[in-house]
Amino acid sequence: MYRGQSGMWAWLLHRVTGVAILLFLLVHIVDITILGFGPTVYNNALSVFALPFVRVVSLGLIAAVLYHSFNGVRITLIDFWPQGTKYQQIMWAAVLVLTIGGFLGMGYYVMLPVFHGCPAHQCG
Amino acid sequence: MATRTSVYAKPNAATSSGFEVFSWYFFRISGLVLVFLAIIHLLVMHVSNDVSQTSYDFVAARYANPFWRVYDLLLLTLALLHGMNGLRVMVDDYVRGRGWRLAWQSFLGLVTVTFWLMGTLTIVAFHPGTAPLGAFFHTLFHLK
């Protein structure tokens, strides 16, 4: 039975994170296009990405990219590695561990300026 | 409605065509490349630099090196095609009715081409100190 097992959640999360990343990509293509209006317009527009609220949103993006990446590797291993289906559940656990670990590491650097008021690498 | 003469009728051409096989491989190959391209991109923009530093001058310094232009063009192209192809599969999954499916697929195709051109123009044509879009809209709204 597929429904309700970890495979269903792995699949559903893969689809939801995929759509979220794609939506951000479309927004991101529009925001880099603002480069064509020169430095003043670009710097003013892109300063929204440094706002604390938008940093929290970008945490979601980072989590989505990490999960979609690692689970994508898992899907490819299931397809091409003869032992893949046997270990798919263990691999999903590994995907979640890598996602959470990577997220905590990267999230620390993203949120640090909010608490220190300066870019991460400039804070002692 | 046409009557089906046999339960063993030819399968739907759309689901058995060579394109679907190509799409299946494309997801996996582009996906494996994107794991590296996207995660390195995130590390550069959010860890080794802070988003507040990724200003116009930052882009200018970065794009002085053609490596990053090629990197970003590859990331843009693979990510957009991978993502839009995913949406195409979702339309096949959820949209019922040939007309609606065709409408959605056409719309997705148009979005793909439009956004790819926007991104590519920015990556290829970016030149510090020039504002081609600013000049374009200035001309557009100040026609005498």
Image (spheres, coloured by chain):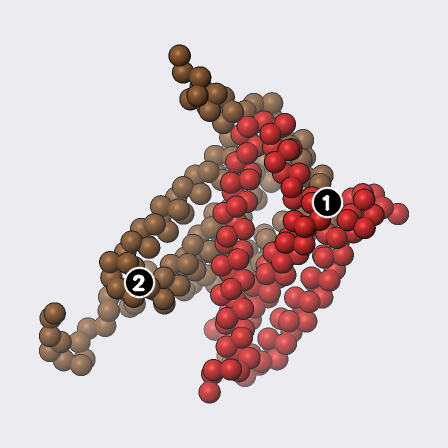
* Residue drawn at 39 percent across, 46 percent down: B111
Q: Nearer the N terminus, badge 1 or badge 2?
A: 2
Judge whether B37 appears above or below B123 on screen.
below
Indicate the quadrant where residue B88 lies: bottom left
Image position of B6 (left or right of A29): left
Q: Position of residue B90 (x, y in %)?
A: 40, 63
* Residue drawn at 53 percent across, 57 percent down: A20
Tag 1's secondary structure?
loop
Image position of B55 (left or right of A83): right
Residue A35 shows which numbered tag? none
* Residue drawn at 71 percent across, 41 percent down: B52
Indicate the quadrant where residue A60 lies: bottom right
Q: In the rendered image, which residue does mark 1 sit on?
A: B50
Residue B18 shows which numbered tag? 2
Amino acid type of disc 1?
A: Asp
| Picture colour for chain B | brown
Letter of the chain in red? A
Distance from label 1 to label 2 (Cα)?
44 Å
* Chain ID of residue with mark 2: B
Q: Position of residue A113 (x, y in %)?
A: 78, 47
Foreground residue among A32 and B77: A32
Q: Residue furthest bottom?
A: A1
Q: Are marks 1 and 2 in contact (CB under 8 Å)?
A: no
Q: Position of residue B136 (x, y in %)?
A: 46, 23
* Chain ID of residue with mark 1: B
Amino acid type of disc 2?
A: Gly
- Asked if both marks, 1 and 2, belong to the same chain, the answer given is yes
Judge whether B126 appears above or below A64 on screen.
above
Tag 2's secondary structure?
helix
